[in-house]
Image: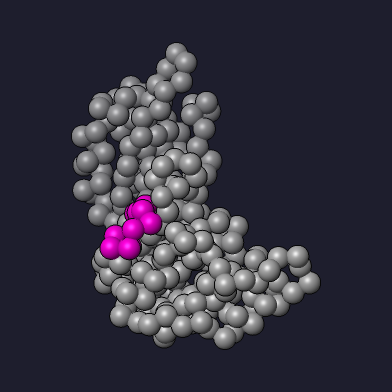
């Protein structure tokens, strides 16, 4: 069976453009490394009804769901309340979360006030997710992992739960970079994808001063099929009178053509 995942990014600051999201890309890469397929990601506002409905939809559709944002101490951090509503749970001040936060604030000039104690409130039937960066924990409930939105904190939390995830084969990829237009090779790509059922193909035009071309990305669990399909794409490029080169994942550079 293939494990699937959905990501929910919560925050008005993302939608307004004030803050740039980097969490989707980072989590997607980590999931691919352990063979979990990211199927969908949504960026949604700090709106109770929207958060509740999105969590309920995602938790039914995917093996794992990851949410980022909205679990801080301020008035607009409503994710935890929404999670409790989504799973019909009550909220409670978790004693272990309180202990961790008290230890964290001891010896500082920062008051561990009621607002900061809010970060110890989680839905019943949840388990804590360690936060090695700033102590305030995330939590897991059913198949939902609730993380902070700050990238470094989210990454620290994610690494602590990585051993709880069950994946499959890693999705491999190759890129055929060519100097021909996307429209010219479209029919060949369709045929190749039909011939190699286990391979997904995407084409992405690129432009640079004085020239243009198409980067063709192939992805598959099957290394042999991936290699054969990549060779087929390169052959199609050459037959169309173009030049091309096959690159391993992360090595694409059209200037090398």
**Left or right: 154 as drawn, with respect to 65:** right
Percent position of residue 84, x then y: 36, 76
Direction right: furthest residue: 107
Image point (58%, 80%), residue name:
97
Q: Which residues are magenta?
A: 41-51
The reply to whether the magenta stretch includes residue 96 is no
Q: Nearer the viewer, residue 157 or 178?
A: 157
The way the protein has been coloured in the rendering is: one colour
Image height of 109 relative to 117, above or below: above
Q: Nearer the viewer, residue 37 or 224?
A: 37
The reply to whether the magenta stretch includes residue 45 is yes
Image height of 131 relative to 226, above or below: below
Q: Is residue 2 visible?
A: no
Percent position of residue 162, x then y: 52, 71
Total of numbered circles in the picture?
A: 0
Picture quadrant where residue 103 is located: bottom right
Direction top: furthest residue: 210
Image point (27%, 30%), residue name:
185
Image height of 185 relative to 149, above or below: above
Image height of 197 relative to 163, above or below: above
Percent position of residue 205, x then y: 36, 29
Image point (51%, 58%), residue name:
149
């Amino acid at each position: 069976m293939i494990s699937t995942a959905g990501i929910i990014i919560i925050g008005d600051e993302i939608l307004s453009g004030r803050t740039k999201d980097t969490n989707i890309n980072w989590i997607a890469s980590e999931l691919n490394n352990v063979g979990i397929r990211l199927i969908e990601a949504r960026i949604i506002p700090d709106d109770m009804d929207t958060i509740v409905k999105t969590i309920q939809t995602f938790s039914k559709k995917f093996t794992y769901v990851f949410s980022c944002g909205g679990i801080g101490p301020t008035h607009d951090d409503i994710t935890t309340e929404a999670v409790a509503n989504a799973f019909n749970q009550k909220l409670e001040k978790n004693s272990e979360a309180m202990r961790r936060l008290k230890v964290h604030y001891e010896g500082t000039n920062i008051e561990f006030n009621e607002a900061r104690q809010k970060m110890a409130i989680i839905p019943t039937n949840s388990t804590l997710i360690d936060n090695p960066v700033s102590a305030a924990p995330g939590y897991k409930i059913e198949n939902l992992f609730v993380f902070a939105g700050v990238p470094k904190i989210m990454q620290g939390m994610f690494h602590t739960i990585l051993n709880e995830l069950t994946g499959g084969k890693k999705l491999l990829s190759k890129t055929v970079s060519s100097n021909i237009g996307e429209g010219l090779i479209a029919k060949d790509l369709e045929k190749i994808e039909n011939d190699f059922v286990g391979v997904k193909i995407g084409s992405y035009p690129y432009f640079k001063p004085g020239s243009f071309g198409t980067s063709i990305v192939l992805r598959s669990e099957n290394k042999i099929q991936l290699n054969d399909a990549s060779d087929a794409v390169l052959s199609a490029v050459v037959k169309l009178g173009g030049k091309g080169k096959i690159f391993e994942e992360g090595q694409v550079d059209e200037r090398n053509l």
